[in-house]
Image (cartoon, rainbow, N blue to C red):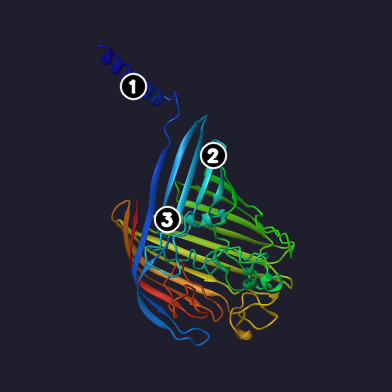
Amino acid sequence: MQKKVLTIAVAGALIAASLARAQGSGPPTAAVEVYGTINLALGRVKYSEAANGAPGVTKWDVLQSASNYGVRGRDSLGGGLTAWFQIESNAPMERSNSISATPASRNSAVGIQGPLGNLFLGQWTTPWADLDGIWSIGTVGNWGPVASIIGRRGDSGGTAPNPNCDNYQSSGGISLTAIAGIHPPCDAVKGGGGVGHPFWRRPSQSVVYQSPVLIGVQFKLLYQTDEGKATVATSADPSMISTSLQWAGMGGRARMGVALDRHKDFTTVGKSDTGYALKGGYNFGVVDLGLAYENFTYKTPLSDCKTSNYAVALAIPMGQGAIRGAYSRAKPITGTYAGVQATVNQTNGSCGATVTAANQADQNGARQYNIGYDHRFSKRTTVGAGYTAIKNDPAANFSWTSFTPIQDGASLTPLAGSDVSTAFVVITHRF
């Protein structure tokens, strides 16, 4: 009898607790979710002859791009506040000597969200890069202008040049390692050749604030701390601020945004590189149109190095899919820098020079275009086919993130002046 009473009492207590929680008497249990994206394609890849005469090559490859997996969760704190976390990693999806699966290599952070906005700490895409979501509707699979032309100036897969580090040599400065013998590279991957660094790269050691959306308007602010501040040899104190203001209206058909960035001591100690971007789009029903413009100023001891990018994208709906296309242009960098660059045997040269011939040093722009069709079979699975190409100037080596190894079968960055293209069939699955 006592066991029956005890059983009934315990069952009653559990039911009462469940009802109280359902009625808001207590916070719900934390929800944790595993998610990810698998993006693989079969493509016939072609590289043209490089500016230095290296032969071109055509090859078949299983192409992986932007595949990822992660875990995220939310916990209600009461009073309209929610604590959240996310840990996201890249998923190479193929054996490679150049790509590795690094834990928390993508957007990873912990924060508090409430009526006044979202405040968090960690590694995240910049507000500048977040604007690409409102215009880049012309991409099939992951081969389009974003992270190939748009936002990618000066990027060969690494983070921004830092005057305190060995990778400063790649940005037109003098290697401190060679002088003092005490400064190893402090970025995971060295920055790209020439003056300049990618404004789209997700920074670490960051504090991020995202305002609530009011009348379709949202403000975002990211501050990367000066964790890399020098203690010897230089007075470099690199840090950055990225901001954006975006708006969406008319049922989401119209969207536009502006971004402003300031990167302190990235190219030259005591000076700040700056940039602004205008991006937006409008869905006319029969066609969705997107436009983007970016402008960069890199500060060097001799002059300001300036350049700009622009792009247009479109999507034409067809049944459960769409015809998608885009064209983008990276204009050459203008200006001069002072210093020694490993690939150019000269003390002064054009910004962004990466070839041995001085008369080609200012030919560092590129053009990208893509066209294709993708079909969404479900909310999770999309299949597409298309063609994409990048036409590099003699001193340029633009490509896509984690693209196939090139002429030498090892590097992921094309040789200067080599054009790259591929016809592909892609499968994307989200879980």
Q: Secondary structure at mark 3?
A: loop
Q: Is residue 251 left or right of residue 269?
A: left
Spatial separation of the CA atoms under disc 1 and disc 2: 31 Å
Label 3 and label 1: CA atoms lie apart by 53 Å
The answer for how far apart the CA atoms under marks 3 and 2 are is: 37 Å
Judge from the rendering whether residue 12 lies leftward or rightward of residue 122; answer left or right. left
Please give the name of the residue rendered at 60% of the width and 64% of the height, measured from the top-left corner. 160
- In this rendering, the count of numbered labels is 3
Q: Taking 273 as reference, is 102 left or right?
A: left
Query: Badge 2: few (under 14), some or many (20 or more) residues near its Cα, within 10 Å?
Result: some
Which residue position is annotated with label 1?
15
Q: Amino acid at mark 1?
A: Ile
Residue 205: give x, y in percent of width and height: 59, 52
Frontmost residue, 409 versus 138: 409
Give the answer, above or below, for where 399 lies relative to 52: above
Rendered residue at 48%/80% (across/down): 418
Q: Position of residue 361 (x, y in %)?
A: 62, 81
The amino acid on which the numbered mark 2 sits, given as a three-letter code, is: Ile
For marks 3 and 2 on the same chain, the one whose residue lies earlier in the sequence: 2
- Check residue 142 in the rendering and tell me which mark sits there, or answer none: none
